């Protein structure tokens, strides 16, 4: 587009929104953010994360009605307009807020929370290539328990040393939580090892009703 000319000394800046990002030129020249940074009144997306500056700070309208600025869909939630990864989780704000409307919606992660699903792993540890898609081998930063084995992803990675993308890590027909029942990473009395295919399963420990919960656990 055409180059936007702005002037910090223009007395009319409070009524101008030269880049149509929802922040007036006066605010952009005047407001400071962490580290003394300022947004650019001539750039609608100062940090280049794909979300307009005004949407990041919760604005619902622009002082210039001709801008056609679409406001923040969730004004109470904020991100930093001068940082492209506000929660420093390794995934850019505009990838987390996929439609870039300022609201955390179904299928999105939260750009203001480093661990959106609360499973003990940062979003960027789960979405390793930071592309907003659950690729092969990745866990889902929107789901606490990606493989549905009743052990949180963070516990599988850091405690039980099981595969958070496979409900039955060792493939012995017993889901991980049925083997390490207290989820402490140690094979305790009466438990089997979720990383040993030979100590659990139909022959060793029957599951008569095939519900994934062993008879010895159901009958206990």
Image (tube, rainbow, N blue to C red):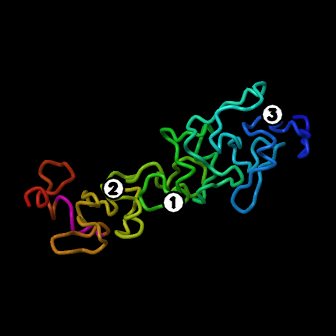
Which residue position holds label 2? Answer: 167
Helix, strand or loop status at disc 1: loop
Q: Residue at x 55, y 44 (%)?
A: 77
Q: Residue at x 78, y 46 (%)?
A: 28
Label 3 vs 2, first from the N-terminus: 3
The boundaries of the magenta stretch are: 196-202
What label does residue 122 carry, if any? 1
Residue that protrudes farthest toward the top in the picture: 66
Calculate the distance from the C-alpha at mark 3 to the C-alpha at mark 2.
58 Å
Calculate the distance from the C-alpha at mark 2 to the C-alpha at mark 1.
21 Å
Label 2 vs 1, first from the N-terminus: 1
Mark 2, Cα crowd under 10 Å, few <14 / some 14-19 / many 20+, is: many
Q: Residue at x 25, y 57 (%)?
A: 173
Query: Looking at the picture, how far across and down is residue 165, in whole percent?
Result: 41, 56
Q: Is residue 199 magenta?
A: yes
The main secondary structure of the magenta stretch is: loop
State left or right for residue 167 relative to residue 173: right
State left or right for residue 132 relative to residue 153: right
Query: Looking at the picture, how far across and down is residue 115, in whole percent?
Result: 49, 56
Mark 3, Cα crowd under 10 Å, few <14 / some 14-19 / many 20+, is: some
Look at the image and tell me in which quarter the N terminus lies: top right
Which residue position holds label 3? Answer: 15
Label 1 vs 3, first from the N-terminus: 3
Numbered disc in front, either 2 or 1: 1
């Amino acid at each position: 587009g055409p180059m936007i000319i702005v002037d910090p000394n223009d007395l009319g800046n409070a009524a101008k929104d030269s880049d149509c990002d929802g922040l007036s030129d006066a605010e952009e020249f005047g407001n400071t953010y962490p580290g003394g940074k300022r947004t650019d009144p001539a750039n609608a997306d100062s940090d280049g994360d794909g979300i307009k500056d005004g949407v990041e700070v919760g604005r619902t309208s622009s002082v210039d009605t001709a801008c056609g600025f679409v406001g923040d869909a969730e004004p109470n939630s904020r991100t930093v307009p001068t940082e492209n990864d506000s929660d420093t989780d390794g995934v850019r704000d505009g990838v987390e807020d996929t439609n870039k409307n300022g609201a955390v919606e179904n299928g999105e992660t939260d750009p203001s929370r480093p661990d959106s699903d609360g499973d003990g792993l940062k979003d960027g540890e789960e979405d390793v290539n930071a592309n907003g898609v659950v690729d092969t081998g990745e866990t889902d930063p929107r789901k606490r328990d990606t493989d549905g084995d009743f052990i949180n992803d963070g516990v599988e990675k850091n405690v039980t040393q099981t595969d958070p993308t496979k409900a039955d890590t060792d493939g012995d027909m017993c889901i991980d939580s049925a083997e390490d029942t207290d989820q402490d990473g140690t094979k305790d009395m009466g438990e089997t090892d979720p990383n040993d295919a030979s100590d659990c399963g139909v022959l060793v420990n029957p599951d008569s009703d095939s519900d994934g919960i062993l008879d010895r656990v159901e009958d206990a």
